[in-house]
Amino acid sequence: MAVSPLPTITLQVPAKINPQIRVGPLQQDGYHDITLVYQAISLYDTLTISHNLDGPTIQVTGMDSDRVPHDERNLVIKAANMLAAHVGVEPQLHFELVKCIPSEAGLGGGSADAAAALIGCNILWKSNLTSSELMDLAAHIGEDVPFFIEGIMAIGLGHKKPLIKLETAGYKWIWVLGVPHQGLSTKAVFQEYDSILERTSTGEEEYLSRRQGCLDTPWGSCPPEELIDDLENDLELPSMQLLPDLRIALGAGSSAGALASLMSGSGSTCAFLAESEEHAKILKEEIQKNEVFREVMTASGPVRGVKVLETVS
């Protein structure tokens, strides 16, 4: 299928926070049974896609660009190649990715960028795939990728399982994000989690109880201050075992007066819940004094997923 010269498209995609993560044992398919809440937040990467006969190629600038692969290992390239194979085109594209989402931080930056690539390429190639079809493809790239297609809030049920979309009542969650100097490998965190499970009596029944609690929580229809006791992450303990400074980092938020402190994803970003924009400013100032963080920023949610900013013919 021949492709004529394409217009240029620019897209914006948010980061995510996980207000709760429940992790069960490793399954026979090599993946963990996992139940987690997603919330898209107002911290954005920007992806511009243009025609390039020698593509696919990518240029990465902005925050942590030196930590991001600049070749076919990048999830943007993987997403473009997967969609191209699916719809029968040559991925003759150049991507310019401007990072504002920290890398190796548990905020889903790489997955978000892949989702932006899927939506942008779908538009440029006039593939006319629906959001549902794009989500199905996205699940083959990474577990978090489908969420960013639409964003807002959802519950994930694990590898290649459909998301449960959450209705939201307009409540605003205000976060201060502290990014430690050292990131964490998702693979290493789950390996440490498995090691902890082997040394404890925690079993499938206990996980299923925690899982049901996650499913029953009114995440989108309740003010965030009423859900403070539900903000938990089963990956915090293994992450702190690998990165002891995380305990200090999470404590910094509590000492500064955060409503709640938790780690996002598999780390290492610490998310501190504020009661207002003004409270967030005060928290940020206090948390910035702690040398354990390399970046401190504010964001709010939930927000929508990938958004087209501009299309230039």
Image (tube, rainbow, N blue to C red):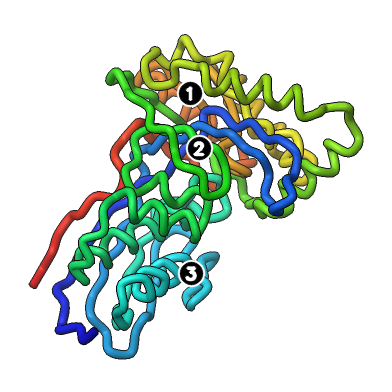
The mark tally for this picture is 3
- Dot in front, 3 or 2: 2
Question: Residue at label 3?
Answer: 74
Between 170 and 67, the residue placed more toward the observer is 170
Between 43 and 186, the residue placed more toward the observer is 186
In the rendered image, is residue 37 in sight?
A: yes
Instruction: Give whichever of discs 2 and 1 has the lower sequence position.
Output: 2
Query: Which numbered circle lies on residue 273?
Result: 1
How far apart are the two marked residues, 3 and 2, measured between alpha carbons? 23 Å
Question: Residue at label 2?
Answer: 156
Which amino acid lies under the numbered mark 3 shown in the image of this protein?
Answer: Asn
How many C-alpha atoms fall within 10 Å of the one at disc 1: few (<14), some, or many (≥20)?
many
How many C-alpha atoms fall within 10 Å of the one at disc 3: few (<14), some, or many (≥20)?
some
Proximity of marks 2 and 1: CB atoms separated by less than 8 Å? no
At numbered mark 3, what does the secondary structure look like: helix, strand or loop? loop
Proximity of marks 1 and 3: CB atoms separated by less than 8 Å? no
In the rendered image, is residue 300 in sight?
A: no
